[in-house]
Amino acid sequence: MLNFAIVGIGWWGQKLINSTQGKSKLFRFTEGVSKEPDSVHDFCTKNVIHLNNDISDVLENPNVDAVILATPHSLHVEQIIACANAGKPVFCEKPLALNKLDAINTISLCQDKNVLLKLGTNKRFWSCMSELDKAYKTGLIGKLLHIEGHYSNENTGRHFSEWRTDPKEAPAAGLTGAGLHVLDALIHYAGPVKILKAHVISIQPQPHVLDTLTVMFEFDSKVSGTMATIRSTPFYWRIHLFGDNGSLEALSENELIIRLKNQDPIKKNFPKVDTLLLELDEFAVNIAAGKVDQKIYEEMISTVDAFEKIVQAVSL
């Protein structure tokens, strides 16, 4: 049983703990770091988590096997570097970094220090996405030609924190909150972005933001793509791969639609899963194995590269 420390015990940090504490057979949270300890004292006591005031406290603790970061975006790079220098495997919520150079340097340091780095991409574990991935890898739809993605939700308004709508922490409207999950999926299948065009329409500022982000892509692979995200509309998820023999469309958390030439569409539904438990269990398995697929690091860098290009495009 591995002992994890979590840095950041706000809305999302508590979700990570609630989804895994006492449920995983591979790890448990034993230490936590919060800048507002009084607000989370009862929560941590209930979950048998010892509270600390600074990340250095858990990095110096020999009983901590790995660190989970659920902190504001601008802190990720310096905190990952601190974990790497302390020799602690680190799991960081997205985004990894706010620019490509920081992403490259951070990953390079982790590799030099032989420290495992994982990124919070829990939507990959949704049943619809797992099944889409399996179907795509069989070559079912042939050559990939185009990919579309949309992820919208109401989380920004429901779980408002000023930093989540601060343009310095969360640029390009809903890109960091929801859009990065779509961007991760698009790059996973289509590869690095060659060129893009992006546009934000902002109607109403925080705390009740009304805005939209739309992006058009050309990938190095010659695949085309589009994505969109809205920070105020009810939950909606869609990833659609179009090939020369058919298409695969992942909807919501557990539905997949397969469309092939000269056949009626096939709709499949799958059980709902707890993606946070699955992704952190995978992190624990990776720690035990002592390695990570290098392709994952390449995708991390490509995602931050595309992220930076979108931010630049909407800032023009």
Image (cartoon, rainbow, N blue to C red):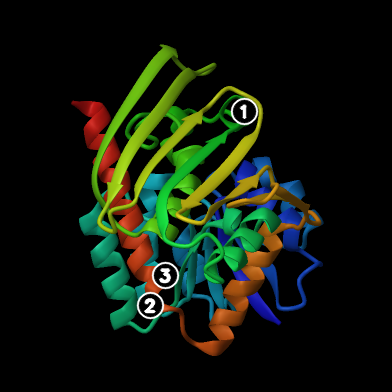
The residue closer to the viewer here, 24 or 43, is: 24
Q: Residue at x 49, y 41 (%)?
A: 149
The dot on residue 23 is: none
- Residue 289 spot, x, y in % from top left: 54, 88
The residue closer to the viewer here, 107 or 237, is: 237
Q: Are marks 1 and 2 in contact (CB under 8 Å)?
A: no
Q: Nearer the viewer, mark 3 or mark 1?
A: 3
In the displayed structure, does residue 23 sit left or right of residue 283? right
Residue at the outermost top position: 203
Mark 3 vs mark 2, CA separation in Å: 5 Å
- Residue 278 spot, x, y in % from top left: 68, 66
The residue tagged with tag 1: helix, strand or loop? loop
- Residue 58 spot, x, y in % from top left: 52, 68
- The residue beneath circle 2 is 294
- The residue beneath circle 1 is 154
In the displayed structure, does residue 211 sit left or right of residue 199? right
Quarter of the figure with the N terminus: bottom right
- The residue beneath circle 3 is 296
Q: Nearer the viewer, mark 1 or mark 2?
A: 2
